Image: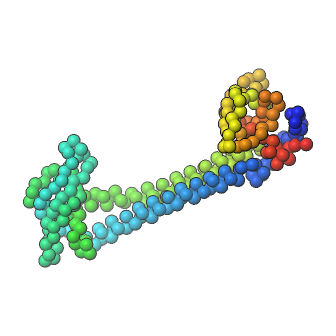
Amino acid sequence: MLYTGAMQLAIPQAPRQVPLTRVPGAVARLVRVVLLGLGLMAVVGVGVWALGRFVVEERTFLARAEPVDGQLMAMTLPSRDEREGAEARLEVVYTLGKVQYSAAGVRTRAEYAEGLGRGARVFLLVDPHAPDRPREAGYVRERAQALEFVPWGVGIGALIAVGLFFWELKRTLRAELDPLRKGMLVWLTPEGPLPESNREAFFPATYFKQDQKHTVRARLGPRRAPVRNGEKVLAAVLSSLPGQARVLDEELARRLGWVR
């Protein structure tokens, strides 16, 4: 039994029955986490779809492409100190069937292109369905090798996204309920005036346990009147969440039936 002057509290011993629906604002915070998680899943899904489509298109090109010898007419190279890992653009002429084509902007590695001169032989891959869009063979095959790892990367990324979603969901539930269900009740001394805010507020405070002073970051719900005893406020602290405290407000105490 606790007497605070204005209120008479009867808070049961831990573990206490604390339904999520009786904690003010808890359901709204949980819904926000779920919506953010679904948004994250949607972004990941769009990324997976786009990446999967790109991989399919690359593999389709490789399956249909025919090797063709081209001739280099001109090239565009990055500056000499920027060529490592960079791309060059080639202008080539080539023949597919009985038709001669010319194409500009054919991408290749800059390190490979800098060893070529005008009139040099260039190995191309050309899709008969798009004969005017050739690709430099070595560049395409190097990219194809890297694409072999894309499905693994996509799978691992999706698992990480799902794991982060459930971790955040569990963390939110734990932060909302565990201090109230299993926490030790203490009287906190705020280190200054309590913040007045329409949003959830945090403030530094201290309490004593076995003559030892502990400093915590106390959490107070938006527009909540804390349970007071003079300048002190009632809060729940949990050993598994060191340095944190959940302030008990009057509305919460009434909803949980802790008021007599």
Q: Residue furthest bottom?
A: 98
Q: Quadrant of residue 242?
A: top right
In this rendered view, identify the residue nearer to me: 223 or 251.
223
- Please report the residue visible at 18 percent of the width from the left and 58 percent of the height from the top: 90
Res. 66 visible in picture: no
Does the image show residue 43? yes
Instruction: Tell me if 179 is positioned left or right of 131 in this view.
Output: right
Left or right of 197? Residue 159 is left
Q: Residue at x 56, y 51 (%)?
A: 164
Q: Is residue 211 above or below residue 243?
A: above
Q: Residue at x 86, y 47 (%)?
A: 257
Horizontal and vertical percent for residue 116? Answer: 13, 54
In this picture, is 104 found above or below 192? below
Q: Position of residue 224 (x, y in %)?
A: 75, 42
Residue 63 in the image: state x and y as whole percent: 30, 71
From the viewer's perspective, tell me whether residue 151 is left or right of residue 194: left
Quadrant showing the C terminus: top right
Q: Within the image, what quadrant is residue 94 found in?
A: bottom left
- Give 84 or 74, whichever is nearer the viewer: 74
Query: Can you give x and y, in whole percent of width and height, for residue 196 in the image?
Result: 69, 37
51 lies left or right of 219: left
Position above or below: 29 against 70: above
Q: Residue at x 81, y 34 (%)?
A: 228
| 43 is higher (above) or lower (below) than 167 | below
Which quadrant of the rendered structure holds the N terminus? top right
